[in-house]
Image: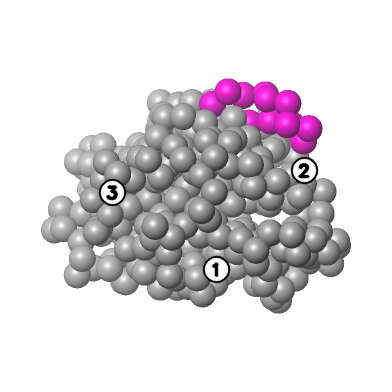
């Protein structure tokens, strides 16, 4: 069994050594770590090179800056010769049993079809002091494994996930993707299986430089003070998730079941329908968020289209 761990780095000199050391401490040792540096201007490559010189399982690719999604896509495409691919973030810290736990789970599933596996994780401060024992329960209440759930709310964190070779082969392009973890999750849920392992396998370091982080009080306060930003972000999430879902129909239509085709098509086009039909679509599939509070807001916005700006919504910058 060939296992590739894929890491994209960018100006990660503060924490990347900790992350690599945590990978080296894994109880499962037969792995390859491929690091693509996305144009760092700090000492990241110098630090990684030191590990490369001492551990032949580690490889560094120095590349130009293309952003996190394209960087991971290149890693998957260029190393498309493994049975399983783990995604690693430069500032997390893996618990020793992470690889063993997730690879053991693969024995229970049919890996001739596309499968994504993911786990819970503990949230920490920058010094790895645990602030939350479960990111899944604290942020999303429960984990999603079904397409209808994952269409509207992502519960997969990239650094806590692994994909098999069949799923890796289906990642064709990076356009209209909110984040690679979310997109691969809906592809797996639609065409194969999305598997959740209810166990934290690594420490998610929360700090000011996270690209996308756990929800914090400071982020919530900013939205309370500026409610227009709150509506903009909510509508951006809805319309961006619709475009991401449309990608399923565009690239994988022939592989989808008729029921899933109808679900995705109705979700993609829901805002084009009259008010009564929008309500019926929400009820037909029980489209919702994981928490009741967010479900009420989500349904109310879609039914009323309050503060919806149509095509302009798609111009909002990614939060």
Q: Disc 3 or 1, which lies upstream in sequence? A: 1
Q: Nearer the viewer, residue 294 or 158?
A: 158
| Residue 193: mark in rendering | 3
Is residue 147 something one can see in this rendering? no
Image side of residue 20 versus residue 178, left or right: right
Place of residue 221 in the rendered image (x, y in percent of width and height, measured from the top left): 70, 31
- Please rate how many residues cluster around mark 2, counting C-alpha atoms within 10 Å: few if below 14, some from 14 to 19, many from 20: few
- Report the magenta residues as a range: 123-134
Identify whether 144 is placed above or below 209: above
State the count of labels: 3
Q: Nearer the viewer, residue 50 or 318?
A: 50
Viewer-nearest of labels 2 and 1? 1
User: Mark 1 highlights which residue?
Assistant: 75
User: Mark 2 highlights which residue?
Assistant: 208
Place of residue 140 in the rendered image (x, y in percent of width and height, measured from the top left): 47, 31
Q: Disc 3 or 2, which lies upstream in sequence? A: 3
From mark 2 to mark 1, how far is it between C-alphas?
26 Å
From mark 3 to mark 1, how far is it between C-alphas?
22 Å
């Amino acid at each position: 069994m060939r296992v590739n761990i894929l890491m994209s780095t960018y100006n990660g000199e503060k924490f990347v050594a900790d992350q690599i050391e945590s990978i080296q401490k894994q109880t499962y040792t037969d792995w390859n770590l491929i690091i693509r540096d996305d144009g760092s201007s700090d000492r990241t490559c110098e630090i990684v090179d030191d590990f490369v010189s001492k551990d032949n399982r580690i490889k560094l690719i120095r590349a130009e800056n293309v952003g996190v999604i394209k960087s991971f896509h290149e890693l998957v495409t260029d190393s498309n010769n493994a049975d399983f691919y783990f995604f690693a973030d430069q500032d997390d810290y893996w618990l020793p049993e992470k690889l063993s736990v997730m690879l053991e789970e693969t024995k229970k599933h049919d890996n001739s079809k596309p499968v994504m596996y993911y786990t819970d994780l503990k949230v920490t401060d920058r010094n790895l002091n645990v602030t939350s024992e479960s990111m899944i329960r604290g942020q999303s209440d429960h984990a999603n494994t079904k397409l209808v759930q994952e269409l509207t709310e992502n519960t997969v964190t990239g650094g806590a996930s692994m994909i098999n070779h069949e799923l890796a082969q289906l990642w064709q392009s990076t356009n209209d993707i909110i984040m690679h973890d979310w997109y691969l999750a809906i592809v797996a849920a639609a065409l194969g299986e999305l598997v959740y392992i209810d166990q934290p396998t690594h420490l998610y370091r929360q700090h000011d430089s996270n690209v996308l982080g756990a929800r914090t009080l400071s982020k919530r306060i900013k939205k309370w003070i500026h409610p227009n930003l709150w509506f903009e972000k909510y509508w951006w999430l809805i319309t961006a998730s619709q475009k991401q879902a449309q990608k399923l129909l565009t690239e994988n239509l022939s592989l989808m079941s008729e029921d899933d085709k109808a679900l995705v098509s109705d979700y993609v086009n829901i805002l084009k329908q009259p008010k009564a039909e929008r309500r019926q679509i929400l009820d037909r599939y029980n489209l919702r968020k994981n928490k009741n509070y967010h479900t009420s807001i989500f349904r109310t916005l879609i039914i009323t289209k309050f503060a919806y700006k149509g095509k302009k919504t798609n111009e909002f910058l990614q939060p």
